[in-house]
Amino acid sequence: MAVFSVGLMSVYLGVVVVAVLTQAVVGYWVYTRHWDRDGSRWFLIMVGTGVLFGLPTVLFLLPIGATYRQAAYVLGAFAAVPNVGAFVVFVSKYTRNDLHRRRWVQGLFGVSIVAYLLLAPTNGTHHLLFADFTMLAEPFPYLAVERGPVFAAIVLLIQVPAGYAVYLMATHLLATRRRSGLQLALFIAGALSVMTLDALSLYTNLFPLEFSHASLGQFPFYLLMTVSLYRFDLLNVKPVARNTIVENLRDPVIVLDDRQRVVDYNGAATHVWPEIGDELPADFESACPALADVTTVPPTETDATEELSLPYDGQGRHYSVTVSAVSEGDDAGTGWCSILLRDITELQQSRWQLEKQNERLDQVASTISHDLRNPITVAESRLELMNVHVERGTVDDETEAKLNEDVSEVTNATGRMQDIINDILTIAREGKTVDETEPVSLSEAANGAWENVDTRAATLTVTDDRVFQADHSKLLTIFENLFRNALDHGPEDVSVTVASTDDGFTVRDDGPGVPETHRDAIFEYGYTTSADGTGLGLSIVKTMSESHGWTVAHDDGYDGGTRFVFSDVKRRDGRTGQGNPEPVAGSGGD
C-alpha cells in the first residue's frame, strides 16, 4: 500500500483506539472515585457499551478478511443501540426528567433491539439491516457498507430520544449559571459529534471511506467528557439543586456535596461571598467560615434553622439559616445539602421595635400602678378618718347617714380602681407571646383556678382530662377570669363545666347566657354589663389565649348558658388534636 493509504488507515485506527482507551480510563476513574454520584452507574454503562461499539470498529478496520470484518461491523452496529440508550438514561437521571421511564422511549429501544437480534442472523437472505457489503481497495482495503431500510429506520428511531436528551441538557445549559453551563456545553458538543459524524459519512462525500463514522465521533465525545469531568467536575454539579434554586432569588443559597464542599450557588450568594466562585468545588469552612460555625451539615433533622449576621454588599444583614437535605430520588442518603439564608433584617427590626414597645408598655403599666395606687391609698386613709368622725358622733344623724352612703360609694370606687389597675397590669405584663411552655393537666389547672376564686355555692365539673403545652400561670388566669365571669353574671349556685375537645377545651356555665345584642362586644376592652365590673376580664382571657397561639370564641349556638371554645391548643407532644381523654371527678363549690 502507498504511504498515504497506510497513514490514513493508521489515523482511522488511532482515533478509534484512543477513543476506546479514553473510555476505559474515564470509566475506571468514575467507578473508583464517583460511584455514588447521581447518574454515575448509567454513565459507566454508557462507557461499557461504547467500548463494545469501538472495539469491533478496530477489528473492522484491520486486514482480517471480509467475513470477519462484516461480523465485526454487525456486532459494533448492534452495540450502538444500547450505547445510545445508556446515554438517554444517563441524561434522564442526571437532569431528573425521567425520560427513560416514558413508554414511548422504552418502546423505541425495545423494538429496535428485538428487530436487530431477529434480523441479524438472516441478513444475508433479506438484506433488511445491511443492503450490501463491498470490499474496496482504495484508499486502502476496507469494507464498504450500505445500510438496509430496517437499520436505517432503527438509527432514525433511536436518534429521536437521543436528540430529546440533548435538548434536555441544553435546557439545563440555559438554566445554569455560566460556570456550570460550560460543563454542559462540552457534554452536548460531544454528544452531537457522534450524530454529526454519522450523518456526514452517510449523506455527504466528505470522508473517503463508505461506512458510518459514528464510532469515530466517540473520540471527541469522550475527549470533551474527560475535560468536563477533570476540569469542571461535571458529576459534582447537581441539576436537582439548580432546578430548586431560582437564579434570581434574592436570598443567598449554596449547595454542599457529601464532602462538605461548595459545589453550587446562586447569584445572591456572591453578594455575601464575592470570591465564592473562584474555584469549585471549594471547602465549606474556608469559603464561608462564619456560616460554617453556626451550621450543622448534614442536618440532624429534615430541616435545621440558625440565625447569624453577615455583610451583603458591605452592609450588615441578619439571616435565618435553613439547612435541608437535597432530594436524591432513588438514591437516598448521599449527604448533599442546600443552605438557604433568608433575610430577616426587617423582621429583626420589627422584633426590636416590639420589644421596645413592650418595655414602654411595662413602664406605663408600672407608672399607672405606682401613681394611681398612691392617691387611692390617700383616699382610703381619708375615708377611714371620716369613718372615725362618724363613729364618734360629731355629726347629726342625717349627716351621718349621708356620710356613710358617700363613704360606701367612694370605697366601692377605689376598690374598682384597684381591680382595674390589677387587670391592666395583667394585660401589660402577662399578655406577651408565650416563649416557654410546660405540660399542663386540664383538670389540675381548672381545679387550681377554682380554689383561687370565691365560688360561693357554685360547682365545677371537669368531664375529662388532657395534657397540653401551656404557661401554667397564664392558664390559671384564663380559668379564674372565666369563673369570675360566670359568678358575676349568674346565680350563686351556677354550675361550671370544663371539657376537652379535639383541638382544645371548652368552659361553659348554666347561667343566663350573653344577650344576643352584646355577643359581638364581649371581648372588647372595658366592655361590661355589670356595674361593679372592670370590663377587662374577658379581654384578659382573649389576650392570654392569643399569647399561647390559641383562639377563643363565644359559642353563639349554645342555648344552655354561656360556652367559650378554645382551639388550636397543642398537645403535650406538640401537635394539635385530642389525646386519650381520662374521666375526672367533678369538684364541688365552697
Image (cartoon, grey):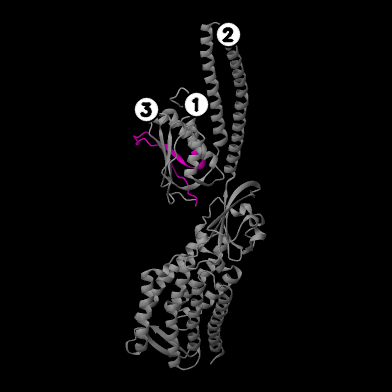
Give the amino acid type for the residue marked by disc 1 in the picture. Thr
Whether residues under marks 1 and 3 lie with C-beta atoms below 8 angstroms apart, the answer is: no
Question: In front: 129, or 565?
Answer: 565
Q: Secondary structure at mark 1?
A: loop
Q: Can you identify the residue that label 1 sits on? A: 534
Question: In front: 436, or 82?
Answer: 436
Residue 78: tell me if it is visible.
yes
Whether residues under marks 1 and 2 lie with C-beta atoms below 8 angstroms apart, the answer is: no
Q: Can you identify the residue that label 3 sits on? A: 517
Q: Secondary structure at mark 3?
A: helix
Tell us which disc is closer to us: 1 or 3: 1
Residue 281 to residue 498: above or below: below
| Residues rendered magenta in the picture | 544-572
Label 3 Cα crowd, 10 Å radius (few <14 / some 14-19 / many 20+): few
Q: Can you identify the residue that label 2 sits on? A: 393
Disc 1/disc 2 C-alpha distance (Å): 36 Å
